Amino acid sequence: MTRPDGSSRHEHEIEETQAMDEEVAINATVALQGPPKVGSARSLAGVMDGRPVAGKTGTSESFRSAWFVGFTPQLVTAVGMFQPGEDGSEETLTPFGGAQNMTGGTFPTDIWGDIMAPSLEGQEMLDFPERVRLDNETRERSYVPPPPPPPTTGRLSRRRSPARSPPRRKSRARSPPRRKSRARSHPRRSRARSRLRSRARSLLRSRRRRRRRARTALAPAVTSATTPETGPRRPDPEPTDRPVTSPDRDA
């Protein structure tokens, strides 16, 4: 802290402790450059005039708070929005300015840009360091993607894979016919049907025998009543008491 005349009024003394390795911080900074470029804070691309920025937006549950913490190689700034209730508890942020929900990518990001752009005006535009490979980083991946399927032509793509089950029609053809399965599952019905068939045949035979006997009995009567040469015979004359004389004797 300095006075208007430039003299020092207070100088804070701290004991510095390194929280992480420098190489880990560099790689984390490389990852944090994504939100300002193509992520939720991409509106800063036009505000910062191409200056490299790293940061991350944040929104709490039920939109009770919204954050954006960002930095450049020279300066870091954090913007947070809250809405306390009458009892001091956090309430859901009331939307304003055309925003439906108050998130870290809305007004916190805009406020951050309005603060950082004039604060860095006239300063040198510095770049972040490039990504480095760590000593404990292995080249092998924990997830190995499966190999791509072999190329197939249009004709082979229509065929089914040999690993699939056979068609349903073939499995039906192997099963026994429906009539045989019914006869095996119902032996009593098949025996009853055979008995009915044999009874019907015996009745038909007995009818044919009766018809033959009736025709045989009627045949002599019809033959005696008619002859093919003379036609129907005349009935015999009734017997009389008169003596029969021959014509020779009467002559």
Image: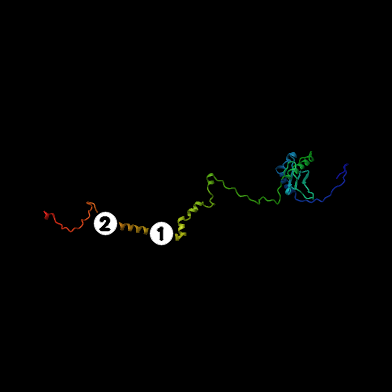
Q: Quadrant of the N terminus?
A: top right
Horizontal and vertical percent position of residue 224: 24, 56
Instruction: Tell me if residue 37 comes above or below residue 142 in the rendering.
Output: above
Q: Circles 1 and 2: CB distance less than 8 Å?
A: no
Residue 196 tag number: 1
Q: Using the rendered view, name the quadrant where residue 246 is placed.
A: bottom left
- Helix, strand or loop for disc 1: helix
Farthest front residue in view: 241
Residue occupying image coordinates x 31% and y 57%: 214
Nearest to the observer: residue 216 or residue 107: 216
Residue 201 appears at what percent x and percent y? 37, 58
Name which residue lies at 39% across and 59% down. Answer: 199
Label tally: 2
**Which element carries disc 2, helix, strand or loop?**
helix
Side (left or right) of 233 relative to 186 = left
Instruction: Please report the residue visible at 43 percent of the width from the left and 60 percent of the height from the top.
Output: 192
* Image x and y of residue 96, in percent: 75, 42
Q: Sequence order check: which comes first, mark 1 or mark 2?
A: 1
Q: What residue is disc 2 on?
A: 221
Q: Which three-letter amino acid code belongs to the residue tagged 2?
A: Ala
Task: Give the residue displayed 49% in from the left and 53% down from the top.
Answer: 172
Pick the residue in front: 12 or 77: 77
Position of residue 227 in the picture relative to residue 37 (left or right): left
Location of residue 126 in the rendering, given as x and y in whole percent from the top left corner:
76, 41
